[in-house]
Image (cartoon, coloured by chain):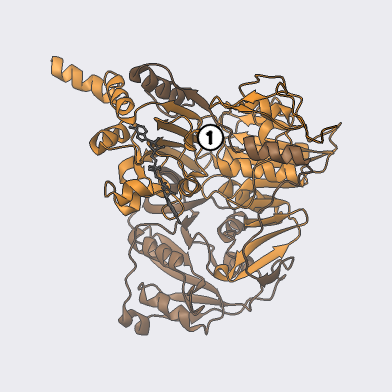
Chain colours: A orange, B brown
Amino acid sequence: MSGIRRINPRRPFRITREGIRRIVLGEEGDAGDITLSPVARAASKPLRLVGEATATLLVVAHSDRGALDAPAREAIAAAAILADPATAVLVLVLGDLAEELGPFGADRILVVPECGNGAFLPDLEVSVLSDVIDRFQPRHVLMPDSPTGTGDLGRRVAAALDAEIATHVVELKPDSVACYRQGGTLLARRGLPRFILLDPGAIDAALPFRGAGERLDYAAHAVAPGLYRDLGLKPVAGAALPLEEADFIVAAGNGVRDVPTLEAVADLFGAAIGASRVAVEDGRFPRDKQVGATGKTVQASVYMAIGISGAVQHLQGIRACRHVIAINSDASAPIARRADLTIVADAQAVMQALVSETARRNWPGDALDEARADG
Amino acid sequence: MDSWQLRIAVLVSIGRNPVSGAARPNRNDLLALELARKAGGEVTILHAGDPNEPALADYLAYSAAPLETIPLPGGQDIVPALAARLQGFHLILTGSRTEGGEASGMLPYALAKRLGLPIVAQALDLAVAEGQAEITQFLPKGQRRRVTVGLPAIIAVHPMAPLAPRYSHLRRVSGQSVALPAPALTESASTAWRTEPARKPVVLKAGEKKSGHARMAAAITSESKGGTLVTDGTPAEKAQAILAYLRSHRLIEF
Ligand SMILES: Cc1cc2nc3c(=O)[nH]c(=O)nc-3n(C[C@H](O)[C@H](O)[C@H](O)COP(=O)(O)OP(=O)(O)OC[C@H]3O[C@@H](n4cnc5c(N)ncnc54)[C@H](O)[C@@H]3O)c2cc1C
């Protein structure tokens, strides 16, 4: 024995996206397992629920264009963490649903496509939620305390049922909830009430397990027209919005030199403009556009990061963003790990292509303009 | 219907200065008061609590409406007493959340239940016509929603309502303030709560029993969920890849 530990040069390895061969100690992997798609990894997590569920925790959330936002996923994770192995997490989705909720911790799912997408239907939603509570008898009902969404619905139903409720919950434990009082100088705590309305950020949505994600059939009873009438949404133009409120942000970093083209891209999507610290400090954008630890924290559904490396200080500001799209000439920039879609290319070329590729799209307004031009 | 007079009640609470803790009018309730003034009609300001609270007089300074106080000791459920006084009003306006006290935002909903009235929250603006209120509601992400509700109704005003209440010292000293007869004491408000000094809340995380190897693997891979990577193609094809992604998630409509 020479005393030197010898390592088998042919032991299993995997190739990362950057093309680097990586040996994972203790893993039985087959050599050359290249992609680790998020779906594949989610499925590899163990199921939380074992056997028949004897109790239910209910989560209620609105969907927007078929997807749930970060506070909704936190509420599902909260229920999955609180639930014991014999308790199912039932998620009532108000609005249509186009994504899997099992990886977020949902065991059973009810979908009510008539609601959601910003519709004001308090009578229908109160009726649906009361009916679901009646049928499934959940021990607790958890929902995001979103002012016009489930925050409104939860208060309505808790008042109607005369049930105990905790709102603006900033801390959740298996046996208690806490929220601020007296302008944040006191923390008030109590045992878990029937209704728990969670403030964003109270829960870490990362789970080591997954839910069964089984969709149940549900048909909402129609309700008679009541006293409320919805006259519809009117959006405020993206550029006029403060960054914190914007739903679509086009953000520029050090890799963007041509600000007018960037503005054209933002215009295309009706997006607000954001910037990295470097781009702000170079004077290309005003300070109030800076996103990140020392700038603004944003909640947009879409965050398009153009020529931004994705430093942790920057990523801190976009934690709540649902879809991140990166355009970067460097495939190994950290932003590529955060982004749902990374385009490896020169920013300038892609920005120009975005503008020219959409020049012929059918705006309702364009058709009018063309008709006018023809006539 | 000229003789019809819109009667509006504005519910006000006592706010507190976030720095000094001194009592003052609640800013959100002042916005409700201003919105009531704008809507026109006969306004009554209503408070349940200590009639001798000096900060109450400040509400008089922001409107010509009389102030009525229902004397109630702290810790009492104010809903029954308010509900009894609120019979006969067409509109009941309030802020969305108190600054002191419970700050749960439940009051308008509890009153709506008790009085059997509809409630619309997060109101930025309000107009009354033909027995209906038309409300512009605040929605996040730059959206506004217009809804109507049949009167009588309760409306909770959003803290960002674009209104500028104006202070007048003359009104403060000449305003009319009455203490109503004290109601019989009823059940105390919920006592399930215990308070403790504020501190940074602890985020709830899933407990995880992991081997060293699993933790290592997570450190390498978990945050690097990494989405689709598009490296090949012309700029036009790459632009189309972005548009296709946005379309498939219904984030754009072209
Ligand atoms: C205490 C502290 C606080 C901070 N707070 C913030 C903050 O709030 N917000 C913030 O953003 N930063 C903050 N930073 C700075 C942060 O660490 C980074 O330095 C900064 O975010 C980098 O900006 P960037 O990505 O635009 O620039 P760079 O790091 O220079 O990255 C530019 C990126 O663009 C790519 N690129 C270059 N040319 C092209 C091209 N032609 N086409 C496509 N891609 C191209 C490059 O590959 C690179 O990935 C903070 C730092 C500290 C120390």
**How many neighbours does mark 1 have within 10 angstroms: few (below 14), some (14-19), or many (20 or more)?**
many
Residue B134 visible? The answer is no
Whether residue B43 appears in this view of the structure is yes
Left or right: residue A85 versus residue A8 is: right
Q: Is residue A102 above or below residue A284?
A: above
Q: Which residue is mark 1?
A: A337
Residue A129 locus on image (x, y percent): 66, 40
The kind of residue on which mark 1 rests is Arg
- Which quarter of the rendered image does ligand 1 occupy? top left
The residue lying at 52 percent from left, 44 percent from top is A319
Give the residue displayed 46% in from the left and 24% down from the top.
B245
Q: Nearer the viewer, residue B105 or A209?
A: A209
Q: Secondary structure at mark 1?
A: helix
Quadrant of residue B71 in the image?
A: bottom right
Question: Does the numbered disc 1 mark a residue whose Cβ is under 8 Å from ligand 1?
Answer: no
Q: Give the percent coordinates (x, y) of residue A227.
A: 51, 43
Count the marks: how many?
1
Which chain letter goes with mark 1? Answer: A
Residue B105 in picture, x, y percent from top left: 57, 59
Left or right of A8: which side holds A115? left
Query: In the image, is residue A30 above or below residue B59?
Result: above
Tell which residue pokes out farthest to the top in this image: A374
Q: Is residue B144 left or right of residue A222?
A: left
Report the quarter where the C terminus of chain B lies: top left
Q: Is residue A337 above or below residue B245?
A: below
Quick one: A215 or A160, which is closer to the camera? A215
